[in-house]
Amino acid sequence: MATIFTKIINGEIPGTFVYQDDVCVAFLDVSPMTEGHAMVVPREEISHWIDADQELLDHLMAVSRVIGRAQQEAFDCERIGVMIQGYEVPHLHIHVWPTNSISDFDISDRAEMQSPEQLAGPAERIRRALESQS
């Protein structure tokens, strides 16, 4: 059975995408830790990040860095947080989010579920910042 992330990637469930290539996508988290919180997800379903090959991991981290730089520009934050944990969805994903404090790393303090309309503004800010990097 396909994971929820595969369903988002395949367009079966709505997602607010900010990046896509042949290997992975990045879309905003519907329950963000901070505004602009994105997840970088491979198209291939891999449950645990240590099971991914090095080439895929390198690509995911490179994309996470690009997304992080765009977030830093878009949200004028002090740092960019990155986390891989994989308990909620058994599909490798890298959380990337703007942060100004260590308290922004508290995964239990996430925003309530956001609608596509609420995510549209932060997504557009990231997309514009990505375009300016090109």
Image: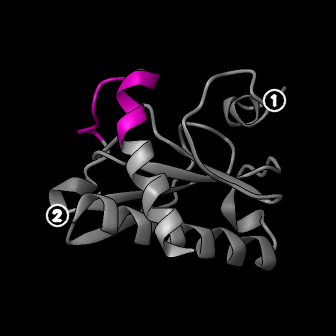
Residue 72 in the image: above or below residue 91 = below
* Residue on which disc 1 sits: 2
Residue 99 lies, in percent from the top left, at 24, 61
At numbered mark 2, what does the secondary structure look like: helix, strand or loop?
A: loop
Chain part drawn in magenta: 108-121
Residue 100: numbered disc = 2
Q: Which sits in the foreground, 2 or 62?
A: 62
Is residue 114 visible to us here?
A: no
Closest to the camera, between mark 1 and mark 2, is 2
Give the side of residue 98 with respect to residue 6, left or right: left
Residue 59 in the image: above or below residue 22 = below
**Quarter of the image containing the N terminus?**
top right
Residue 75 lies, in percent from the top left, at 26, 58
Residue 102 in the image: above or below residue 108 = below
Q: Mark 2 Cα within 10 Å, few/some/many (few <14, many 20+)?
A: some
Give the side of residue 5 with respect to residue 17, left or right: right
Residue 114 lies, in percent from the top left, at 37, 25
Q: Amino acid at mark 2?
A: Asn
Residue at image position (32%, 60%) is 74
Based on the picture, tell me whether residue 110 belongs to the magenta stretch: yes
At numbered mark 1, what does the secondary structure look like: helix, strand or loop?
A: loop
Q: Amino acid at mark 1?
A: Ala
Residue 19 lies, in percent from the top left, at 62, 54
